Image: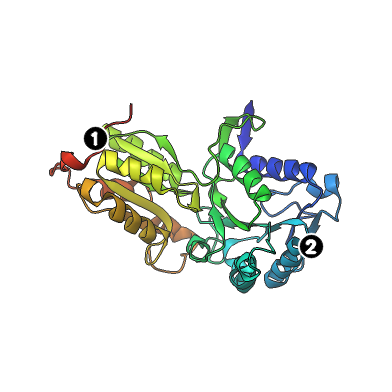
């Protein structure tokens, strides 16, 4: 076991996937010679050669179409789209072909491929470098959508994605690339893809978060404890498929719920989560489910992103809005987990 950054974990996951399966390829803009702008593919071209790790032109739609052809031909391409908003030129290929090929061919042609997208703000980037674009992918049937928040998850969720028989959009929180953990990546303790996990147990409120919002939720939970509010933090990990079981069990125990996302609030993933929670937990809720999200504006310049990004104070404000003076109907609360 040693200290590992999320960027190193992702690099190790790709390296191990390339070693495990000769059909795995990785490519994108600056992926080969440079090793990626965030160095996620650092050293892979030297070890595996330029036929398995290589650069592409600045043509996202073209490289996505190339990946579709490779996957149809039996390869397992791992594509890097350099920044979140750079993926939009490729979206026609993703929505029209990557997501639909299995259904279009009645299951005869699958596309086992991974689309890696560094996403989110917090690094001082401008628009096109700081978007949270998960809603577009989550709204597209035929895609799995995954986003890690820890070093260990970064490794194992990416390994799962490469082995998946269907396309996976793998969203990497840029501001967590340099986060560190003591981790032994050779031994798996991470939950499987498709399952949410409780990062911090609590009994008064459930905070639902994913990707870059998970550390914010944990910090808010620590602050709330100083005021005597016991907050449970659930890391969703996988947006599609969505783990209703873990989320519902948590909210039914606490009776209150706040959803935290970095993306704009209107019509975002958080809106879908709120709807699912209220449909399944209505009789256990002591208060309406509240969202904390980015504002409904284009991503701001670096000097203003601190005001745009959901922070601990905004999460604490949301928690305080949850009607703690009114007790939930105990007849509908699930018992505490033993």
Q: Name the secondary structure under disc 2.
A: loop
Cα–Cα gap, marks 1 and 2: 58 Å
Determine whether 96 is above or below 24 in the image: below
Q: Are marks 1 and 2 in contact (CB under 8 Å)?
A: no
Q: Name the residue rendered at 58%, 39% in the picture.
A: 151
**The quarter of the displayed image where residue 264 is located:** bottom left
The residue that mark 1 highlights is: 227
**The quarter of the displayed image where residue 335 is located:** top left
Determine whether 158 is above or below 28 in the image: above
Q: Name the residue rendered at 33%, 59% in the picture.
A: 275
In the image shown, does 80 or 140 lie closer to the viewer?
140
Q: How is colour applied across the structure in the image?
A: rainbow
Whether residue 43 is visible: no
In the image shown, does 108 or 99 lie closer to the viewer?
108
Q: Earlier in the sequence, mark 1 or mark 2?
A: 2
Whether residue 97 is visible: yes
Please give left or right for residue 249 compared with residue 211 in the image. Answer: left
The residue that mark 2 highlights is: 73
Q: Name the residue rendered at 30%, 52% in the picture.
A: 280
Q: Residues within 10 Å of mark 2 (few under 14, many from 20)?
A: few
Percent across and percent down for residue 21 are 78, 46
Number of labels in the image equals 2
Please give left or right for residue 282 compared with residue 303 in the image. Answer: left
Q: Name the secondary structure under disc 1.
A: loop
In the image shown, does 90 or 228 lie closer to the viewer?
90
Percent across and percent down for residue 284 are 23, 45
**The quarter of the displayed image where residue 85 is located:** bottom right
Identify the image quadrant of the C terminus.
Answer: top left
Percent across and percent down for residue 165 are 66, 53
Q: Residues within 10 Å of mark 1 (few under 14, many from 20)?
A: few
Identify the image quadrant of the N terminus.
Answer: top right
């Amino acid at each position: 076991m040693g200290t590992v950054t999320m960027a190193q974990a992702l690099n190790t996951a790709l390296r191990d996937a390339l070693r495990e399966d000769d059909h795995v390829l990785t490519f994108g803009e600056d992926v080969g010679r440079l090793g990626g702008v965030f160095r996620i593919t650092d050293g892979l071209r030297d070890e595996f050669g330029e036929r398995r790790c290589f650069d592409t032109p600045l043509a996202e739609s073209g490289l996505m179409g190339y990946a579709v052809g490779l996957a149809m031909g039996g390869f397992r391409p791992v594509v890097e789209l350099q920044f979140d908003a750079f993926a939009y030129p490729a979206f026609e290929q993703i929505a029209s072909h990557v997501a639909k090929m299995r259904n279009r061919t009645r299951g005869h042609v699958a596309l086992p491929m991974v689309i890696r997208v560094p996403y989110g703000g917090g690094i001082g980037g401008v628009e096109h470098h700081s978007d949270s674009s998960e809603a577009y992918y989550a709204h597209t049937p035929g895609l799995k959508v995954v986003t890690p928040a820890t070093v260990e998850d970064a490794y194992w969720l990416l390994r799962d994605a490469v082995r998946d028989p269907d396309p996976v959009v793998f969203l990497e929180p840029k501001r967590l690339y340099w986060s560190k953990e003591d981790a032994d990546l050779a031994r798996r303790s991470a939950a499987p893809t498709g399952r949410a996990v409780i990062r911090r147990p609590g009994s008064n409120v459930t905070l639902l978060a994913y990707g870059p919002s998970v550390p914010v939720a944990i910090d808010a939970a620590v602050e709330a404890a100083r005021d005597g509010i016991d907050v449970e933090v659930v890391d969703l990990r996988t947006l599609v498929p969505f783990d209703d079981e873990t989320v519902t069990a948590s909210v039914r125990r606490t009776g209150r719920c706040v959803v935290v996302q970095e993306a704009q609030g209107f019509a975002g993933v958080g809106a879908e989560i709120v709807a699912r929670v209220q449909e399944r937990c209505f009789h256990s809720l002591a208060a309406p489910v509240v969202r904390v999200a980015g504002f409904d504006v284009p991503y701001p310049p670096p000097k203003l992103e601190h005001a745009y990004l959901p922070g601990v104070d905004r999460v604490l404000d949301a928690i305080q809005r949850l009607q703690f003076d009114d007790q939930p109907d105990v007849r509908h609360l699930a018992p505490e987990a033993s």
